[in-house]
Image (spheres, helix red, strand yellow):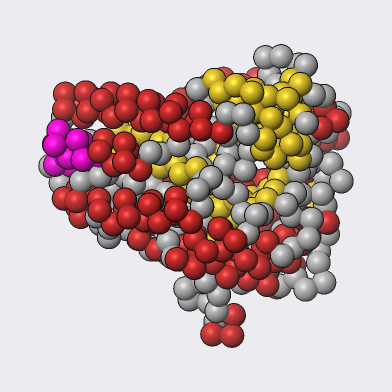
Amino acid sequence: MSSNEILHSNLSDNAGEETRRQFSYMEKAESYVKELSEKLGRKPTACVVTFGCQMNARDSEKLLGILTKIGYEEVDTEDADFVIYNTCTVRDNADQRVFGRLGYVSGIKKKNPYMKIALCGCMMQEQGAIEKIQKSYRHVDLIFGTHNIFKFAELLCTMFESDRMIIDIWKDTNQIVEDLPIVRKYPFKSGINIMFGCNNFCTYCIVPYVRGRERSRNPRDIIREIEYLAADGVKEIMLLGQNVNSYGKGLPEDEQMSFAELLSEVCKVSGIERVRFMTSHPKDLSDDLIKVIAENEKVARHIHLPLQSGSDEILKKMNRHYTKESFLKLVDKIRTAIPDVSITTDIIVGFPGETDNDVDDTIDVVKKAAFDNAFTFIYSKRTGTPAAAMEQVPESVSKPNFDRLLKVVQETAKQQAQRFTGQTHRVLVEDINEQDSSLVTGRMSNNTLVHFPGDASLIGSFVDVALDECHGFYYTGHAI
Ligand code: 5AD
Ligand code: SF4
Protein backbone atom coordinates (compact mmCIF):
# COMPACT_ATOMS: atom_id res chain seq x y z
CA MET A 1 0.00 0.00 0.00
CA SER A 2 1.46 3.41 -0.89
CA SER A 3 1.17 6.47 1.32
CA ASN A 4 -1.71 7.71 -0.82
CA GLU A 5 -3.91 4.73 -0.23
CA ILE A 6 -6.28 4.78 2.70
CA LEU A 7 -6.11 2.93 5.96
CA HIS A 8 -9.56 1.90 7.30
CA SER A 9 -10.94 2.67 3.88
CA ASN A 10 -13.74 0.15 4.46
CA LEU A 11 -16.05 -0.19 7.42
CA SER A 12 -14.42 -2.55 9.92
CA ASP A 13 -16.42 -5.39 11.52
CA ASN A 14 -16.19 -3.99 15.02
CA ALA A 15 -17.00 -0.39 14.02
CA GLY A 16 -19.19 1.53 16.45
CA GLU A 17 -22.49 3.20 15.65
CA GLU A 18 -21.05 6.66 14.95
CA THR A 19 -18.40 5.20 12.62
CA ARG A 20 -21.18 3.45 10.65
CA ARG A 21 -23.15 6.70 10.41
CA GLN A 22 -20.12 8.53 9.06
CA PHE A 23 -19.45 5.81 6.48
CA SER A 24 -22.99 6.26 5.19
CA TYR A 25 -22.35 10.01 4.85
CA MET A 26 -19.16 9.20 2.94
CA GLU A 27 -21.26 7.29 0.41
CA LYS A 28 -23.59 10.25 0.02
CA ALA A 29 -20.66 12.70 -0.23
CA GLU A 30 -19.10 10.48 -2.90
CA SER A 31 -22.16 11.00 -5.09
CA TYR A 32 -21.86 14.80 -4.69
CA VAL A 33 -18.19 14.66 -5.64
CA LYS A 34 -19.08 12.53 -8.67
CA GLU A 35 -21.60 15.17 -9.79
CA LEU A 36 -18.92 17.84 -9.37
CA SER A 37 -16.40 15.87 -11.39
CA GLU A 38 -18.93 15.55 -14.22
CA LYS A 39 -19.35 19.33 -14.22
CA LEU A 40 -15.59 19.91 -14.14
CA GLY A 41 -14.76 17.16 -16.64
CA ARG A 42 -12.02 15.89 -14.30
CA LYS A 43 -11.44 14.62 -10.77
CA PRO A 44 -11.85 17.49 -8.27
CA THR A 45 -8.76 18.40 -6.25
CA ALA A 46 -8.38 19.05 -2.51
CA CYS A 47 -5.61 20.72 -0.52
CA VAL A 48 -5.27 20.51 3.27
CA VAL A 49 -3.05 23.22 4.77
CA THR A 50 -1.86 22.36 8.30
CA PHE A 51 -0.71 24.81 10.96
CA GLY A 52 0.73 23.93 14.36
CA CYS A 53 1.66 20.72 16.10
CA GLN A 54 1.85 16.96 15.42
CA MET A 55 -1.74 16.53 16.65
CA ASN A 56 -2.95 18.80 13.86
CA ALA A 57 -0.76 16.96 11.35
CA ARG A 58 -2.48 13.72 12.38
CA ASP A 59 -5.93 15.33 12.16
CA SER A 60 -5.10 16.47 8.62
CA GLU A 61 -4.33 12.86 7.67
CA LYS A 62 -7.85 12.00 8.88
CA LEU A 63 -9.38 14.79 6.76
CA LEU A 64 -7.43 13.58 3.74
CA GLY A 65 -8.53 10.00 4.41
CA ILE A 66 -12.16 11.04 3.98
CA LEU A 67 -11.51 13.40 1.05
CA THR A 68 -9.62 10.69 -0.83
CA LYS A 69 -12.28 8.09 -0.07
CA ILE A 70 -15.10 10.25 -1.47
CA GLY A 71 -13.22 10.94 -4.70
CA TYR A 72 -11.01 14.02 -4.34
CA GLU A 73 -7.45 14.02 -5.62
CA GLU A 74 -4.94 15.32 -3.08
CA VAL A 75 -2.84 18.29 -4.23
CA ASP A 76 -0.51 20.57 -2.27
CA THR A 77 -1.37 23.95 -3.79
CA GLU A 78 -4.23 26.22 -2.82
CA ASP A 79 -5.59 26.58 -6.38
CA ALA A 80 -7.61 23.41 -5.64
CA ASP A 81 -11.39 22.84 -5.83
CA PHE A 82 -11.48 22.40 -2.06
CA VAL A 83 -9.06 24.06 0.38
CA ILE A 84 -9.13 23.29 4.11
CA TYR A 85 -7.12 25.21 6.67
CA ASN A 86 -6.47 23.15 9.80
CA THR A 87 -5.63 25.98 12.18
CA CYS A 88 -3.56 26.52 15.35
CA THR A 89 -4.05 29.21 17.96
CA VAL A 90 -1.28 28.57 20.48
CA ARG A 91 0.31 31.94 19.69
CA ASP A 92 -1.17 35.00 18.00
CA ASN A 93 1.10 34.78 14.93
CA ALA A 94 -0.53 31.41 14.06
CA ASP A 95 -3.92 33.20 13.90
CA GLN A 96 -2.51 36.00 11.76
CA ARG A 97 -1.06 33.55 9.24
CA VAL A 98 -4.50 31.96 8.74
CA PHE A 99 -6.13 35.33 8.08
CA GLY A 100 -3.34 36.03 5.57
CA ARG A 101 -4.07 32.76 3.72
CA LEU A 102 -7.83 33.49 3.71
CA GLY A 103 -7.17 36.82 2.04
CA TYR A 104 -4.98 35.17 -0.59
CA VAL A 105 -7.39 32.33 -1.37
CA SER A 106 -10.39 34.64 -1.87
CA GLY A 107 -8.72 35.80 -5.12
CA ILE A 108 -8.49 32.19 -6.32
CA LYS A 109 -12.13 31.48 -5.42
CA LYS A 110 -13.34 34.38 -7.57
CA LYS A 111 -11.94 32.53 -10.61
CA ASN A 112 -13.34 29.09 -9.73
CA PRO A 113 -17.14 29.07 -9.17
CA TYR A 114 -17.07 25.49 -7.85
CA MET A 115 -14.37 26.12 -5.27
CA LYS A 116 -15.11 25.44 -1.57
CA ILE A 117 -13.13 26.65 1.46
CA ALA A 118 -13.24 25.11 4.95
CA LEU A 119 -11.69 26.06 8.29
CA CYS A 120 -11.17 23.74 11.24
CA GLY A 121 -8.84 23.17 14.20
CA CYS A 122 -7.95 25.01 17.38
CA MET A 123 -8.49 28.59 16.23
CA MET A 124 -12.16 27.84 15.49
CA GLN A 125 -12.70 27.04 19.20
CA GLU A 126 -11.34 30.42 20.27
CA GLN A 127 -13.61 33.20 21.52
CA GLY A 128 -14.40 35.71 18.80
CA ALA A 129 -12.78 33.87 15.88
CA ILE A 130 -16.06 32.80 14.26
CA GLU A 131 -17.56 36.31 14.52
CA LYS A 132 -14.51 37.75 12.79
CA ILE A 133 -14.69 35.20 9.95
CA GLN A 134 -18.45 35.70 9.50
CA LYS A 135 -17.88 39.43 9.23
CA SER A 136 -14.75 39.68 7.12
CA TYR A 137 -14.31 36.36 5.29
CA ARG A 138 -17.70 35.61 3.76
CA HIS A 139 -16.15 33.33 1.12
CA VAL A 140 -15.64 30.51 3.68
CA ASP A 141 -18.12 27.64 3.13
CA LEU A 142 -17.61 25.39 6.16
CA ILE A 143 -16.30 25.87 9.70
CA PHE A 144 -15.96 23.15 12.33
CA GLY A 145 -13.90 22.66 15.48
CA THR A 146 -11.63 20.15 17.19
CA HIS A 147 -14.33 18.08 18.93
CA ASN A 148 -16.45 17.16 15.91
CA ILE A 149 -13.77 16.45 13.29
CA PHE A 150 -15.12 12.88 13.14
CA LYS A 151 -18.29 14.39 11.57
CA PHE A 152 -16.35 15.71 8.56
CA ALA A 153 -18.17 13.47 6.03
CA GLU A 154 -21.55 14.54 7.41
CA LEU A 155 -20.55 18.21 7.35
CA LEU A 156 -19.36 17.87 3.75
CA CYS A 157 -22.82 16.62 2.76
CA THR A 158 -24.44 19.63 4.46
CA MET A 159 -21.98 21.92 2.67
CA PHE A 160 -22.84 20.44 -0.74
CA GLU A 161 -26.57 20.83 0.00
CA SER A 162 -26.42 24.50 1.02
CA ASP A 163 -25.17 27.83 -0.29
CA ARG A 164 -24.82 29.28 3.21
CA MET A 165 -21.75 29.27 5.46
CA ILE A 166 -22.02 26.09 7.57
CA ILE A 167 -20.77 26.47 11.15
CA ASP A 168 -20.64 23.60 13.63
CA ILE A 169 -18.56 24.12 16.79
CA TRP A 170 -18.86 22.01 19.94
CA LYS A 171 -17.75 23.24 23.36
CA ASP A 172 -16.38 19.85 24.44
CA THR A 173 -16.90 16.12 23.94
CA ASN A 174 -16.17 12.82 25.62
CA GLN A 175 -16.59 10.92 22.36
CA ILE A 176 -13.70 9.14 20.59
CA VAL A 177 -14.71 7.76 17.19
CA GLU A 178 -12.49 4.92 15.94
CA ASP A 179 -11.75 3.38 12.53
CA LEU A 180 -12.38 6.31 10.20
CA PRO A 181 -10.30 6.54 7.00
CA ILE A 182 -6.76 7.95 7.24
CA VAL A 183 -4.21 8.81 4.54
CA ARG A 184 -0.64 8.78 5.82
CA LYS A 185 1.92 11.30 4.67
CA TYR A 186 4.76 8.78 5.02
CA PRO A 187 4.43 5.05 4.28
CA PHE A 188 7.07 4.10 6.88
CA LYS A 189 6.22 6.28 9.88
CA SER A 190 3.06 7.48 11.54
CA GLY A 191 1.69 9.43 14.48
CA ILE A 192 -0.95 7.83 16.69
CA ASN A 193 -3.24 9.68 19.10
CA ILE A 194 -3.23 8.04 22.50
CA MET A 195 -5.13 10.82 24.25
CA PHE A 196 -6.90 14.07 23.49
CA GLY A 197 -7.20 17.35 25.37
CA CYS A 198 -5.38 18.68 28.43
CA ASN A 199 -6.31 19.25 32.07
CA ASN A 200 -3.24 21.14 33.20
CA PHE A 201 -4.33 24.72 32.63
CA CYS A 202 -0.88 26.27 32.48
CA THR A 203 -1.88 29.91 32.88
CA TYR A 204 -0.45 31.10 29.52
CA CYS A 205 -1.92 28.29 27.45
CA ILE A 206 -5.11 28.19 25.39
CA VAL A 207 -4.93 24.46 24.60
CA PRO A 208 -7.19 23.25 27.47
CA TYR A 209 -9.87 25.68 26.27
CA VAL A 210 -9.72 24.68 22.60
CA ARG A 211 -8.90 20.97 22.88
CA GLY A 212 -11.12 20.24 25.87
CA ARG A 213 -10.76 17.86 28.80
CA GLU A 214 -8.23 15.06 28.85
CA ARG A 215 -9.50 11.71 27.56
CA SER A 216 -7.45 8.61 26.84
CA ARG A 217 -8.04 6.16 24.04
CA ASN A 218 -8.69 2.60 25.04
CA PRO A 219 -5.34 0.66 25.06
CA ARG A 220 -6.84 -2.15 22.94
CA ASP A 221 -7.81 0.34 20.20
CA ILE A 222 -4.30 1.85 20.27
CA ILE A 223 -2.54 -1.52 19.99
CA ARG A 224 -4.97 -2.64 17.27
CA GLU A 225 -4.20 0.49 15.24
CA ILE A 226 -0.46 -0.01 15.68
CA GLU A 227 -0.70 -3.66 14.58
CA TYR A 228 -2.65 -2.49 11.55
CA LEU A 229 0.04 0.10 10.76
CA ALA A 230 2.87 -2.42 11.24
CA ALA A 231 1.17 -4.82 8.81
CA ASP A 232 1.00 -1.91 6.38
CA GLY A 233 4.77 -1.30 6.46
CA VAL A 234 5.08 1.31 9.23
CA LYS A 235 8.33 0.96 11.18
CA GLU A 236 8.38 4.05 13.35
CA ILE A 237 5.48 5.45 15.33
CA MET A 238 4.98 8.51 17.48
CA LEU A 239 2.50 8.31 20.34
CA LEU A 240 0.74 11.67 20.52
CA GLY A 241 -0.88 13.55 23.39
CA GLN A 242 -0.63 17.00 25.02
CA ASN A 243 0.69 15.29 28.14
CA VAL A 244 1.35 11.60 27.46
CA ASN A 245 2.57 11.06 31.02
CA SER A 246 -0.95 11.34 32.37
CA TYR A 247 -2.24 8.70 29.92
CA GLY A 248 -4.78 6.30 31.39
CA LYS A 249 -6.55 8.57 33.86
CA GLY A 250 -10.30 8.07 33.53
CA LEU A 251 -10.12 4.73 31.68
CA PRO A 252 -12.62 2.11 32.89
CA GLU A 253 -11.30 0.05 35.82
CA ASP A 254 -10.69 -3.15 33.85
CA GLU A 255 -8.65 -1.24 31.26
CA GLN A 256 -6.43 0.76 33.62
CA MET A 257 -2.95 1.33 32.18
CA SER A 258 -0.20 3.87 32.82
CA PHE A 259 1.83 5.47 30.04
CA ALA A 260 4.89 3.40 31.03
CA GLU A 261 2.82 0.21 30.69
CA LEU A 262 1.34 1.31 27.37
CA LEU A 263 4.80 2.13 25.98
CA SER A 264 6.06 -1.26 27.01
CA GLU A 265 3.07 -2.97 25.31
CA VAL A 266 3.51 -0.92 22.13
CA CYS A 267 7.16 -2.07 21.89
CA LYS A 268 5.95 -5.67 21.72
CA VAL A 269 4.18 -5.11 18.39
CA SER A 270 6.33 -6.90 15.84
CA GLY A 271 7.36 -4.86 12.81
CA ILE A 272 7.48 -1.65 14.83
CA GLU A 273 11.16 -0.87 15.29
CA ARG A 274 11.15 2.60 16.81
CA VAL A 275 8.69 4.30 19.13
CA ARG A 276 8.63 8.02 19.83
CA PHE A 277 6.28 9.99 22.04
CA MET A 278 5.31 13.65 22.48
CA THR A 279 4.83 15.59 24.81
CA SER A 280 5.94 14.88 28.38
CA HIS A 281 5.01 17.16 31.26
CA PRO A 282 7.93 17.20 33.76
CA LYS A 283 5.55 17.01 36.74
CA ASP A 284 4.25 13.57 35.68
CA LEU A 285 7.33 11.83 34.26
CA SER A 286 7.58 8.67 36.35
CA ASP A 287 10.53 6.47 37.35
CA ASP A 288 8.66 3.58 35.73
CA LEU A 289 8.71 5.42 32.43
CA ILE A 290 12.46 6.09 32.67
CA LYS A 291 12.95 2.38 33.36
CA VAL A 292 10.87 1.30 30.34
CA ILE A 293 12.84 3.64 28.06
CA ALA A 294 16.21 2.56 29.47
CA GLU A 295 15.42 -1.14 29.11
CA ASN A 296 13.83 -0.97 25.70
CA GLU A 297 15.99 -0.45 22.63
CA LYS A 298 12.91 0.29 20.51
CA VAL A 299 12.06 3.46 22.43
CA ALA A 300 13.72 6.45 20.76
CA ARG A 301 16.53 8.10 22.70
CA HIS A 302 14.70 11.41 22.75
CA ILE A 303 12.57 13.09 25.38
CA HIS A 304 10.88 16.41 24.73
CA LEU A 305 10.52 17.94 28.18
CA PRO A 306 9.15 21.49 28.14
CA LEU A 307 10.80 23.67 30.80
CA GLN A 308 8.91 26.93 29.98
CA SER A 309 10.90 28.84 32.64
CA GLY A 310 13.76 28.24 35.07
CA SER A 311 12.48 30.70 37.68
CA ASP A 312 10.54 29.25 40.62
CA GLU A 313 8.38 32.34 40.89
CA ILE A 314 7.43 32.31 37.21
CA LEU A 315 6.87 28.53 37.23
CA LYS A 316 4.44 29.02 40.08
CA LYS A 317 2.58 31.77 38.24
CA MET A 318 2.51 29.51 35.16
CA ASN A 319 0.90 26.73 37.26
CA ARG A 320 3.58 24.22 36.24
CA HIS A 321 3.90 22.28 39.53
CA TYR A 322 7.71 21.89 39.58
CA THR A 323 10.70 23.98 40.58
CA LYS A 324 14.06 24.75 39.00
CA GLU A 325 15.67 22.26 41.38
CA SER A 326 13.20 19.44 40.82
CA PHE A 327 13.45 19.90 37.03
CA LEU A 328 17.25 19.67 37.14
CA LYS A 329 17.03 16.59 39.37
CA LEU A 330 14.70 14.95 36.86
CA VAL A 331 17.06 15.71 33.97
CA ASP A 332 19.93 14.26 35.98
CA LYS A 333 17.96 11.10 36.71
CA ILE A 334 17.09 10.68 33.02
CA ARG A 335 20.68 11.27 31.83
CA THR A 336 22.06 8.80 34.38
CA ALA A 337 19.61 6.05 33.40
CA ILE A 338 19.77 6.72 29.62
CA PRO A 339 23.19 8.27 28.86
CA ASP A 340 22.69 8.55 25.07
CA VAL A 341 19.32 10.33 25.36
CA SER A 342 18.67 13.72 23.77
CA ILE A 343 16.59 16.08 25.83
CA THR A 344 14.84 18.94 24.06
CA THR A 345 12.59 21.59 25.51
CA ASP A 346 10.24 24.56 25.02
CA ILE A 347 10.87 27.89 26.73
CA ILE A 348 8.72 31.02 26.93
CA VAL A 349 10.27 34.45 27.46
CA GLY A 350 8.25 37.49 28.53
CA PHE A 351 5.61 35.81 30.69
CA PRO A 352 3.80 38.44 32.83
CA GLY A 353 6.03 39.72 35.63
CA GLU A 354 9.22 38.12 34.26
CA THR A 355 12.38 40.06 35.15
CA ASP A 356 15.98 39.86 33.93
CA ASN A 357 16.78 37.81 37.06
CA ASP A 358 14.10 35.26 36.16
CA VAL A 359 15.65 34.87 32.71
CA ASP A 360 19.07 34.41 34.36
CA ASP A 361 17.55 31.41 36.14
CA THR A 362 16.22 30.04 32.85
CA ILE A 363 19.66 30.44 31.26
CA ASP A 364 21.21 28.67 34.23
CA VAL A 365 18.89 25.67 33.70
CA VAL A 366 19.69 25.59 29.96
CA LYS A 367 23.40 25.38 30.79
CA LYS A 368 23.02 22.82 33.56
CA ALA A 369 20.48 20.61 31.77
CA ALA A 370 22.57 20.85 28.56
CA PHE A 371 19.51 20.68 26.32
CA ASP A 372 20.15 19.13 22.94
CA ASN A 373 17.78 21.69 21.49
CA ALA A 374 15.21 24.20 22.71
CA PHE A 375 12.29 25.88 21.00
CA THR A 376 12.12 29.40 22.36
CA PHE A 377 9.00 31.55 22.15
CA ILE A 378 8.12 35.10 23.09
CA TYR A 379 5.05 34.99 25.34
CA SER A 380 1.86 35.62 23.39
CA LYS A 381 -1.22 36.85 25.24
CA ARG A 382 -4.20 34.52 24.69
CA THR A 383 -7.64 35.92 25.49
CA GLY A 384 -9.45 33.92 28.17
CA THR A 385 -6.32 32.51 29.86
CA PRO A 386 -5.44 33.62 33.43
CA ALA A 387 -2.11 35.12 32.30
CA ALA A 388 -3.92 37.49 29.93
CA ALA A 389 -5.27 39.33 33.00
CA MET A 390 -1.80 39.70 34.61
CA GLU A 391 0.43 42.70 34.12
CA GLN A 392 2.24 42.23 30.78
CA VAL A 393 5.98 42.65 30.15
CA PRO A 394 6.95 45.29 27.55
CA GLU A 395 8.82 44.16 24.45
CA SER A 396 11.74 46.39 25.48
CA VAL A 397 12.34 43.89 28.32
CA SER A 398 11.35 40.59 26.70
CA LYS A 399 13.15 41.02 23.36
CA PRO A 400 16.72 41.49 24.75
CA ASN A 401 16.08 38.62 27.19
CA PHE A 402 14.90 36.43 24.33
CA ASP A 403 18.07 37.20 22.34
CA ARG A 404 20.26 36.51 25.36
CA LEU A 405 18.57 33.14 25.96
CA LEU A 406 18.69 32.13 22.29
CA LYS A 407 22.47 32.65 22.20
CA VAL A 408 22.99 30.26 25.12
CA VAL A 409 20.52 27.72 23.69
CA GLN A 410 22.41 27.67 20.38
CA GLU A 411 25.82 27.31 22.04
CA THR A 412 24.61 24.48 24.28
CA ALA A 413 22.87 22.65 21.42
CA LYS A 414 25.99 22.88 19.25
CA GLN A 415 28.17 21.49 22.01
CA GLN A 416 25.75 18.66 22.71
CA ALA A 417 25.37 17.70 19.04
CA GLN A 418 29.07 16.93 18.64
CA ARG A 419 29.11 14.22 21.26
CA PHE A 420 28.26 11.41 18.82
CA THR A 421 31.05 12.12 16.26
CA GLY A 422 32.86 8.92 15.24
CA GLN A 423 30.11 6.63 16.52
CA THR A 424 27.85 4.43 14.40
CA HIS A 425 24.09 4.95 14.76
CA ARG A 426 20.95 3.38 13.25
CA VAL A 427 19.28 5.85 10.92
CA LEU A 428 15.77 5.61 9.46
CA VAL A 429 16.08 7.01 5.93
CA GLU A 430 13.26 9.48 5.19
CA ASP A 431 14.06 11.25 1.93
CA ILE A 432 16.50 12.19 -0.82
CA ASN A 433 18.56 15.18 0.35
CA GLU A 434 16.99 18.40 -0.90
CA GLN A 435 20.28 20.09 -1.85
CA ASP A 436 22.31 17.14 -3.13
CA SER A 437 20.46 14.24 -4.77
CA SER A 438 23.42 11.86 -4.33
CA LEU A 439 22.66 11.93 -0.58
CA VAL A 440 19.78 10.61 1.51
CA THR A 441 18.51 12.11 4.77
CA GLY A 442 17.40 10.23 7.84
CA ARG A 443 17.06 10.47 11.60
CA MET A 444 18.93 8.85 14.44
CA SER A 445 17.03 7.45 17.40
CA ASN A 446 17.63 10.73 19.23
CA ASN A 447 16.02 12.61 16.31
CA THR A 448 19.28 14.15 14.96
CA LEU A 449 19.37 14.50 11.16
CA VAL A 450 22.04 12.61 9.21
CA HIS A 451 22.95 12.97 5.51
CA PHE A 452 24.91 10.23 3.73
CA PRO A 453 25.48 8.85 0.20
CA GLY A 454 22.58 6.65 -0.96
CA ASP A 455 19.58 6.44 -3.28
CA ALA A 456 15.78 6.33 -3.18
CA SER A 457 15.75 2.55 -2.63
CA LEU A 458 16.85 3.21 0.97
CA ILE A 459 13.84 5.37 1.87
CA GLY A 460 11.90 3.73 4.69
CA SER A 461 14.71 1.42 5.80
CA PHE A 462 17.09 1.45 8.75
CA VAL A 463 20.79 1.83 7.88
CA ASP A 464 23.82 1.78 10.20
CA VAL A 465 25.69 5.01 9.54
CA ALA A 466 29.14 6.09 10.74
CA LEU A 467 28.87 9.72 11.87
CA ASP A 468 31.90 11.39 10.25
CA GLU A 469 31.31 15.07 10.84
CA CYS A 470 28.98 17.21 12.91
CA HIS A 471 27.76 20.44 11.23
CA GLY A 472 26.01 22.18 14.11
CA PHE A 473 22.59 20.53 14.06
CA TYR A 474 23.17 17.62 11.66
CA TYR A 475 25.75 15.01 10.74
CA THR A 476 27.26 13.78 7.51
CA GLY A 477 28.40 10.19 7.42
CA HIS A 478 28.60 6.96 5.42
CA ALA A 479 26.69 3.66 5.52
CA ILE A 480 28.61 0.69 6.90
N1 5AD B 1 2.85 32.16 24.33
C1 5AD B 1 4.03 31.66 23.90
N2 5AD B 1 4.31 30.36 23.82
C2 5AD B 1 3.32 29.48 24.19
N3 5AD B 1 3.30 28.15 24.23
C3 5AD B 1 2.09 27.76 24.67
N4 5AD B 1 1.32 28.84 24.92
C4 5AD B 1 2.07 29.93 24.64
C5 5AD B 1 1.85 31.32 24.70
N5 5AD B 1 0.71 31.83 25.13
C6 5AD B 1 4.45 27.31 23.89
C7 5AD B 1 4.87 26.44 25.08
C8 5AD B 1 4.45 25.06 24.65
C9 5AD B 1 4.59 25.16 23.14
C10 5AD B 1 3.87 24.12 22.37
O1 5AD B 1 4.11 26.43 22.84
O2 5AD B 1 6.26 26.54 25.21
O3 5AD B 1 5.25 24.05 25.22
FE1 SF4 C 1 -0.80 23.87 27.42
FE2 SF4 C 1 0.27 23.18 29.77
FE3 SF4 C 1 -1.56 21.57 28.61
FE4 SF4 C 1 0.89 21.79 27.54
S1 SF4 C 1 0.41 20.96 29.58
S2 SF4 C 1 -1.07 21.86 26.43
S3 SF4 C 1 1.40 23.94 27.95
S4 SF4 C 1 -1.89 23.65 29.39
In the figure, 100 relative to 314: above or below?
above
Q: Is residue 24 magenta?
A: no
Residue in front for this viewpoint, 419 or 143: 419
Horizontal and vertical percent position of residue 113: 67, 27
What residue appears at the point 77 percent right and 73 percent down from the top-left corner? Answer: 14
Residue most toward the top? 436
Horizontal and vertical percent position of residue 329: 32, 55
What residue appears at the point 44 percent right and 53 percent down from the top-left corner? Answer: 336
Horizontal and vertical percent position of residue 325: 25, 53
Q: Is residue 361 magenta?
A: yes
In the figure, 168 relative to 413: above or below?
below
User: On the rendered image, what quadrant is the C terminus found in?
Assistant: top right
Residue in front for this viewpoint, 85 or 419: 419
Horizontal and vertical percent position of residue 229: 76, 55
Taking the image as drawn, is residue 407 in sight?
yes
What residue appears at the point 45 percent right and 66 percent down from the top-left corner? Answer: 287
Hey, which quadrant is residue 463 in on the image?
Answer: top right
Count of labels shown?
A: 0
Residue in front for this viewpoint, 168 or 248: 248
What span is in magenta? 351-362
Left or right: 144 in relation to 307: right
In the figure, 28 relative to 39: above or below?
below
Residue most toward the bottom? 254
Taking the image as drawn, is residue 39 in sight?
no
Residue in front for this viewpoint, 475 or 30: 475
Left or right: 350 in relation to 123: left
What residue appears at the point 74 percent right and 55 percent down from the top-left corner? Answer: 272
